[in-house]
Image (cartoon, rainbow, N blue to C red):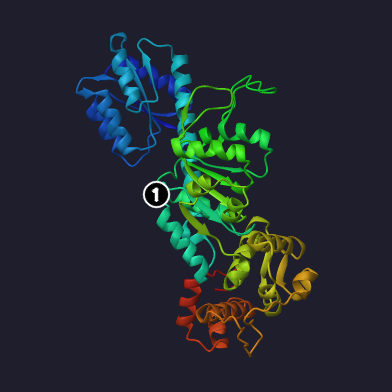
Amino acid sequence: MQAPSRILIVDDESSLRTALFRVLDRQGFQVITANCKREAEALASTDQALDLAIVDLRLPDGDGIELMQHLKIAHPNIQVVVMTGHGSIELAVKATQHGAFHFVTKPFNMEELLSIVSRALSHKTLQQENHQLRSALHKKYRFDNIVGSSEEIRKVLGMVERVADSDSTVLVTGESGTGKELIAKAIHYNSPRASKPFIPINCGAIPAELLESELFGHVKGAFTGAIANRVGRFEMASGGTLFLDEIGELSLNLQVKLLRVLQERRFEPVGSAKTQEADVRIIAATNVDLAKAVKNGQFREDLFYRLHVIPIGIPSLKERRSDIPLLLHHFVQHFNSTKNRGLTGFSPDALEALYHYPWPGNIRELENLVERLAILKGNGQVEVADLPEHYRASRSDSLFGPGETAVEIPDAGVDFNTAVDNYENLLILQALEKTGWNRNQAAALLKLNRTTLVEKIKKKGLRPPPEASA
């Protein structure tokens, strides 16, 4: 059961304190009172949280605004309602400018005050929920939560970490399903704009005739069907980040308008002559070769260079095969948790088959496969027979897999460190899956010191399924 909200009343008039105490107490609030600034500060210094304070602006030993600022330092989430006489309206307005939720002038109606108290506490709850949501998002999109230990993905994350603090435009490129939006969110939620909105828009999913209105908004009557004003994505993202996915699908007409916004940092809603500031960071993404599109006359060269300030290329899954076991393990844990399933991992043969599969749909395809297996199989270890036929039948010309002892180096050569990393990941995952995540037994299978194996597991971010032995 949720504890009642705790309210502090500060006023030197004994009769008013008593009246407020009785009214708020009857509403189920926990109420404490103080007759001066010093007493209020003493009450605020205890470990008990304060949700709301009702403060008179003129106290016998100090200024109500100073008290409010003290309360907000001691209790960052507190809401403050100030009380003032008719001759001090200007002071009350100043209090709201310094963070007061609202003010009331004496004498006031108790029903009016109760309404303000209710709104202030609701506002506090929304602020807390918003803070918790943003904290969760920030945690979710930390750099170390992006799965992968391959050299290819480490280079990408290094670039993301370097550019997050800036406001520069970023162009994320890569095949469909490689996680371009995930990278864009990692940039946003690790940037100074993290507390502001991240607004995505898929430029290829909205008809060209509607996209301008989606981006910039429109005013009532701007065109047939515009029955009310509409806020566009640029305005929604104010102070934050606008993610333009599939930017290569933008029409030439809209490319001109987007270029103007990037140059001038201003835009007008459709049908309006009023210019608005565009305080947004732009992150664009595409799975097409924009440089080639420029040569073919399908994309403006000047816009390309405006977007191409900081390019980040995301490798395809077949270019980072050493991450496949880690990704499979990650999604098994995720779907076990979200769908209440009990998959324990993949058999060595199933792992080998998936390692050699070409993954045309990249990480999105791998995630969908694990979700399908979690639903259809539900529990236990995934065997080769559990995989759809095209995963079982596929064998690529990858350097090697877990069951191979002979290695044939292709004519184009091979990256030795990547190949060794691939093999190490596969061997460790197989040993752990085979022993039910018993590190002692896995170390014995691999003829490794247990401490060495534990360090490698930690470095690669491997975690056992909830029911597996530690």
Disc 1 designates what residue? 166
Q: Position of residue 1 (x, y in %)?
A: 53, 40
Q: Residue 371 lies in what quarter of the image?
A: bottom right
133 sits left or right of 86 in the view = right
**Residue 239 visible to the viewer:** no
Residue placed most toward the observer, 29 or 436: 436
Q: Nearer the viewer, residue 262 or 327?
A: 262
Q: How many marks?
A: 1
Task: Kindly identify the residue that appears in the image at 39 percent across and 36 percent down.
Answer: 77
Amino acid on which the number 1 mark rests in the picture = Ser
Residue 393 visible at all: yes
Tell me where residue 408 sits by quadrant: bottom right
Around disc 1, counting alpha carbons within 10 Å, would you say few (fewer than 14), some (14 to 19), or many (20 or more)? few
Mark 1, secondary structure of its residue: loop
> Residue, x 52% and y 68% (percent of image)?
152
Q: Quadrant of the C terminus?
A: bottom right
- Residue 453, horizontal then vertical, whole percent: 49, 80
Q: Above or below — where is 388 with respect to 120?
A: below
Position in image of residue 93 (x %, y %)? 33, 18
Residue 56: x and y in percent read 30, 20
Q: Is residue 289 left or right of residue 50?
A: right
From the viewer's side, name the closer residue of 53 and 211.
211
Is 276 placed above or below 135 here? above
Residue 89 as seen in the image, left or right of residue 122: left
